[in-house]
Image (cartoon, rainbow, N blue to C red):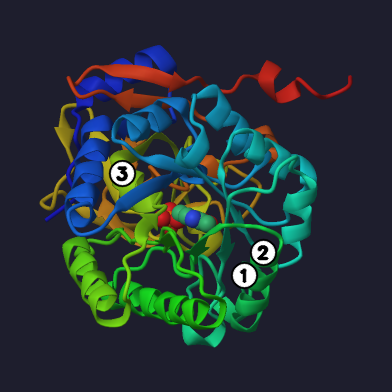
């Protein structure tokens, strides 16, 4: 079964008339449905909280939806903290999971009363220096080293720059306790786009072993376990949805088996919540037959760098005036490319797709997370607008198209 579109050709044409192509379209219904599914899976078994990873889709309208769903946010940088401030998100609704953090970053995070998650043992001093008062709670990001595997998105833990080592755990918490920190959390984020439920069980198992050590050696009972984001989505047709209800059951079993108290369970998903809600709508602007059969679209890797960066697969639908291309349409093998002076500016390589004409709409699926957010301006490409398809089927511009004036604002002519 081909992947479905939650909109029709008329909607696309109406949006194009107003805002041109390419553009990102996010479906609010899909986001809300997924938010509910996440809560339904975890909130009846745990004292659960989701912190939406802003980096996935840093848009105030999306952040507002997450806030309405009762979620906090995971912020990693000063800019993301400033976005929180503008969106009236404060206090323990912000999990500040940064790395390479400056004193200014910590000052802002503390000013907003965020939960501070430290990426390195040396940052304990920095956070204390940045604060007038010792924070009540601190969290450490754990890198489980060779106890867990990673993937191409986030790297294998042994190679990943994130978090403290297993050997550093006791010294870190001991030092923080000695400095007067009263409450603690524990965090890890080791895999991204994982579709295997047992991976999360293994991750929680590693954290629980650390928790039991913290209790035994330092008499610390942590307030929460934050297992980060990382729930995968089926980008490909032959991939199955992750069974998050099963993940929840597995974690609960482990809690019951190995812990004599029940810390809160936190998560910070980006991809799982917004990925499937997003579509990059582009138009085919040219064809080229050389050593390969190229179809050139008006979007480029500067809109969506995942295929170029990790050879990531994104499903594609072709829409043509009057009809949707389907399984019965004649097919051809093509490379779908953008117009950057960069040869990995490709959305699909050797992909069998319905025969494509100039002016067809080429729709790239599952771009609602780590899509536009990772965009850039190479070759002076201006960043595409974002449109929200609202619950009632109407649409709303939630971020305008970047203009030449925006692009040159800081250039000195
Ligand atoms: C610390 C942290 N938390 C959460 C996320 C969100 O990950 P995902 O979108 O895969 O759920 C990321 C992604 O890079 C991250 O670095």
User: In the rendered image, which residue does mark 3 sit on?
Assistant: 356
Q: Answer left or right for 40 relative to 62.
A: left
Q: Earlier in the sequence, mark 3 or mark 2?
A: 2
Q: Earlier in the sequence, mark 3 or mark 1?
A: 1
Q: Nearer the viewer, mark 3 or mark 2?
A: 2
Query: Disc 1 vs disc 2: Cβ atoms closer than 8 Å?
Result: yes
Of the pair 369 and 23, the residue shown nearer to us? 369
Q: Answer left or right for 157 relative to 258.
A: right
Q: Answer left or right for 239 relative to 102.
A: left
User: In the rendered image, which residue does mark 2 sit on?
Assistant: 176
Query: Disc 3 vs disc 2: Cβ atoms closer than 8 Å?
Result: no
User: In the rendered image, which residue does mark 1 sit on?
Assistant: 173
Is residue 178 in sight in this rendering? yes
User: Residue 42 at what x, y percent from top left?
Assistant: 23, 56
Write the residue at 34% across / 76% down: 199
* C-alpha span from label 1 to label 2: 5 Å
């Amino acid at each position: 079964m081909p992947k479905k579109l939650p909109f029709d050709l008329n909607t696309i044409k109406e949006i194009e008339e107003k805002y041109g192509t390419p553009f990102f379209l996010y479906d609010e219904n899909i986001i809300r449905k997924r938010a509910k599914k996440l809560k339904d899976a975890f909130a009846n078994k745990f004292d659960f909280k989701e912190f939406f990873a802003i980096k996935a889709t840093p848009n105030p309208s999306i952040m507002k939806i997450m806030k309405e769903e009762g979620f906090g946010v995971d912020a990693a940088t000063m800019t993301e903290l400033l976005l929180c401030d503008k969106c009236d998100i404060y206090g323990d609704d912000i999990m500040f999971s940064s790395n390479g953090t400056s004193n200014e970053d910590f000052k802002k995070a503390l000013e907003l009363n965020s939960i501070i998650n430290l990426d390195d043992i040396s940052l304990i001093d920095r956070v204390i220096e940045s604060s007038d008062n010792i924070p009540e709670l601190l969290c450490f990001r754990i890198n489980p080293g060779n106890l867990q595997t990673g993937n191409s998105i986030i790297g294998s833990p042994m190679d990943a720059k994130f978090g403290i080592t297993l050997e550093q755990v006791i010294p870190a918490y001991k030092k923080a306790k000695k400095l007067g920190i009263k409450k603690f959390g524990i965090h890890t984020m080791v895999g991204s786009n994982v579709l295997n439920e047992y991976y999360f069980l293994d991750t929680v198992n590693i954290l629980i072993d650390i928790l039991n050590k913290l209790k035994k050696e330092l008499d610390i009972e942590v307030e929460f376990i934050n297992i980060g984001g990382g729930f995968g989505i089926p980008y490909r047709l032959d991939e199955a949805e992750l069974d998050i209800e099963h993940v929840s059951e597995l974690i609960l079993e482990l809690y019951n088996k190995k812990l004599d108290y029940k810390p809160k369970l936190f998560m910070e998903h980006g991809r799982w919540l917004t990925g499937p809600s997003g579509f990059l709508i582009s138009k085919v602007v040219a064809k080229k037959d050389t050593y390969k059969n190229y179809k050139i679209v008006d979007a480029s890797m500067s809109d969506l760098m995942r295929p170029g960066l990790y050879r990531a697969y994104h499903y594609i639908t072709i829409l043509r005036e009057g009809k949707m291309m389907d399984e019965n349409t004649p097919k051809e093998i093509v490379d779908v490319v953008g117009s950057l002076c960069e040869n990995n500016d490709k959305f699909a390589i050797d992909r069998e797709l319905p025969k494509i004409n100039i002016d067809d709409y080429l729709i790239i699926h599952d771009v609602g997370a780590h899509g536009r957010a990772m965009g850039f301006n190479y070759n002076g490409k201006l960043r595409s607008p974002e449109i929200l398809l609202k619950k009632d089927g109407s649409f709303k511009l939630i971020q305008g198209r970047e203009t030449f004036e925006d692009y040159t604002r800081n250039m000195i002519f």
